[in-house]
Amino acid sequence: MFEAFPSPFHDVLHTNYAASATETQAIHALLAASFDELSNLAEEIDSAQKTLDRLVSRHTLLKAHVDAHLALTSPFRRLPPEILSEIFIQCLPTDRNPTRSLTEAPLLLTMISKDLRELALSIPQLWTNIHVHLPQCPSNGQVDVDEMDALIHRRREGIEAWLNRSRCLPLSISVHLSGY
């Protein structure tokens, strides 16, 4: 095996050998220069790490600058509203009515950007279908009337806003009553 740093103690390195007092002095003398070099290397590594950190930070900032400008040239941004409207309509579930969930169209489409929110809210075809889920009352029969009233009020407001966006188009409404 090639030894990067020659040593007169090569044969006993990585063994359970215990150095004598004389050998201990010789080892310390041998390592004095190595300790200095370790210190110098640590300083160089620290300096290189600081340089690397500075470069990574500058790279991150420059990349964000470039990406923000490239986003302005995105072909998607130049699509006419009519095409975007059709894309949005195609995002609707086809096997059921959409729910009032922020994780699926049409509500998900209102969370992309301000402009796309306004567009989604202006497309009546996105809002003609809805699935309403009415939760079951607690199994113990104990109902907090104020809490239930607030829930019903929020659901009613959300459904009214949804249906108002459909304007005068025909509606498809499905309802699920839990526990019934």
Image (spheres, helix red, strand yellow):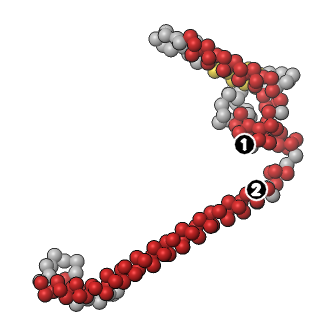
Which residue shows up at 71% across the image and 20% down it?
157
The amino acid on which the numbered mark 2 sits, given as a three-letter code, is: Ala
Q: Is residue 89 visible?
A: no
Instruction: Give me the residue at 36% from left, 83% from top.
Output: 37
- Which numbered tag is attached to residue 112? 1
User: Neighbour class for label 1 at 10 Å: few (<14), some, many (≥20)?
Assistant: few
Q: Quadrant of the N terminus?
A: bottom left
Q: Mark 2 highlights which residue?
A: 71
Residue 3 coordinates in the image, percent (x, y): 32, 87
Instruction: Tell me the SS state at disc 2.
Output: helix
Name the side, left or right, on which 21 lies relative to 27. left
At 87% across and 46% down in the image, what residue appears? 80
Residue 2 disc label? none
Q: Position of residue 36 (x, y in %)?
A: 34, 83
Mark toward the start of the polypeptide (2 vs 1): 2
* Circle 2 residues within 10 Å: few <14, some 14–19, many ≥20: few
Q: Looking at the image, how many numbered discs can be counted on the residues?
A: 2
Residue 127 image position (x, y, % from top left): 78, 28
Is residue 112 visible in the rendered image? The answer is: yes
54 sits to left or right of 80: left
